[in-house]
């Protein structure tokens, strides 16, 4: 199913703009995230559905994202970005750079950061993004400290439930106000007051919170090195035993480290990453005569019928159906 994007003004006076994007294909979905430079991999089997709704103000944007399948998300949210993310479910388990995010007092925060996020099935995230320079200038104007310890890498953070509830409540009120009344132009006092309230509240949240310590560093280093080898697109092809030898861990130890850090076994993780890469290749190179077997072999699948079964179980369609749909879309352009 092709993605559907709309970007339209929420008022006739150049006020907040509403951006909506949705897709039933994980690769088409992340390609349509116009301000985020992210790659999504679908980690759990089944039909994927992703949607993003963002309200864009002159100085910030608030957003709500929903995905139906477990995903690995990596990349950046753009240069000079300050972002907080609030999982809507307090029981959902999210993993961010070695830290586990689950509970009413936890949230995600990044300042000019590289992102690697593992999200569960049926995940919803509510958040706010702004220029880091804007937030830093506000902190200086108010004589407040700038939380430099959150720079460079998205992290999990802990705050009081009351502080998170205030931010969630303000985001909800902002959305409701714009749904009822859409003539808040950028020059109006109402618009500037709403933006000021949002910016001040997220600054308070960042300052009053503390980073969550990642899991044991040795396990994290083992998993990071193993994944670096798995995700490498250069050099000789590697098997799982090759990875174990390179990182100096037995298969059992590597499995324990992966379960602790990512919640999956290394074999499962690597297979779904390779399935996602194979799907992307099939979508990107679907002229007449595409050799599906060659694509499968390129990504380490030597048993073609097993590859087809795994592919259909994961993406709810056969590889040949993916190629046929891609050809049909190209023919309609």
Image: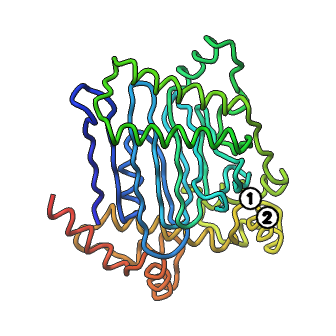
CA neighbours of label 1 inside 10 A, class few (<14), some (14 to 19), many (20+): many
Quadrant in which the C terminus appears: bottom left
CA neighbours of label 2 inside 10 A, class few (<14), some (14 to 19), many (20+): many
Furthest toward the left, the residue is 332
Q: Could you say which is closer to the camera, residue 29 or residue 284?
A: 29
Q: Is residue 92 left or right of residue 32?
A: right
Q: Kindly identify which numbered label has been placed on residue 20.
A: none
> At 51% from the left edge and 67% from the top edge, which residue is drawn?
69
User: What distance separates the C-alpha of mark 2 from that of mark 1?
Assistant: 6 Å
Indicate whether 264 appears above or below 125: below
Q: Kindly identify which numbered label has been placed on residue 223.
A: 1
Measuring from the top left, give residue 34's x and y in whole percent: 37, 42
Measuring from the top left, give residue 169's x and y in whole percent: 55, 42
> At 53% from the left edge and 68% from the top edge, which residue is drawn?
274
> At 48% from the left edge and 75% from the top edge, which residue is drawn?
297
Indicate whether 132 appears above or below 162: above
Q: Which residue is mark 2?
A: 257
Q: Quadrant of residue 7?
A: top left
Secondary structure beneath label 1? helix
């Amino acid at each position: 199913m092709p993605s559907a994007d709309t970007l339209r003004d929420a008022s006739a006076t150049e006020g907040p703009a509403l951006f909506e994007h949705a897709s039933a294909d994980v690769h088409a979905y992340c390609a349509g995230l116009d301000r985020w430079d992210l790659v999504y991999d679908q980690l759990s089997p089944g039909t994927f559905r992703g949607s993003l709704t963002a309200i864009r103000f002159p100085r910030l944007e608030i957003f709500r994202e929903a995905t139906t399948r477990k995903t690995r998300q990596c990349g950046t949210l753009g240069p000079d970005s300050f972002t907080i993310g609030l999982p809507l479910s307090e029981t959902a388990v999210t993993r961010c750079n070695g830290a586990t995010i689950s509970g009413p007092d936890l949230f995600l925060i990044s300042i000019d950061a590289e992102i690697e996020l593992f999200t569960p099935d049926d995940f919803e995230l509510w958040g706010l993004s702004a220029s880091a320079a804007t937030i830093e200038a506000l902190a200086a104007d108010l004589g407040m400290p700038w939380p430099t310890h959150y720079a460079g890498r998205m992290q999990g953070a802990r705050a009081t439930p009351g502080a998170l509830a205030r931010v969630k409540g303000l985001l909800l009120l902002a959305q409701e106000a714009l749904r009822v009344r859409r003539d808040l132009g950028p020059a109006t006092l109402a618009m500037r007051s709403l933006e000021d309230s949002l910016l001040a509240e997220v600054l308070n949240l960042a300052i009053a919170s503390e980073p969550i310590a990642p899991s044991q560093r040795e396990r994290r280093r083992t998993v990071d090195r193993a994944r670096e080898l798995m995700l490498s697109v250069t050099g000789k092809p590697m098997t799982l035993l090759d990875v174990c030898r390179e990182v100096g861990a037995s298969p059992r130890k590597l499995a324990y480290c992966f379960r602790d850090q990512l919640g999956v076994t290394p074999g499962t993780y690597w297979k779904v990453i390779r399935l996602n890469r194979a799907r992307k290749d099939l979508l990107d190179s679907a002229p007449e005569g595409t050799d599906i077997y060659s694509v499968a072999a390129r990504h380490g699948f030597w048993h073609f019928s097993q590859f087809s079964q795994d592919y259909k179980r994961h993406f709810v369609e056969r590889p040949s159906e993916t190629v046929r749909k891609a050809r049909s879309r190209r023919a309609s352009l």
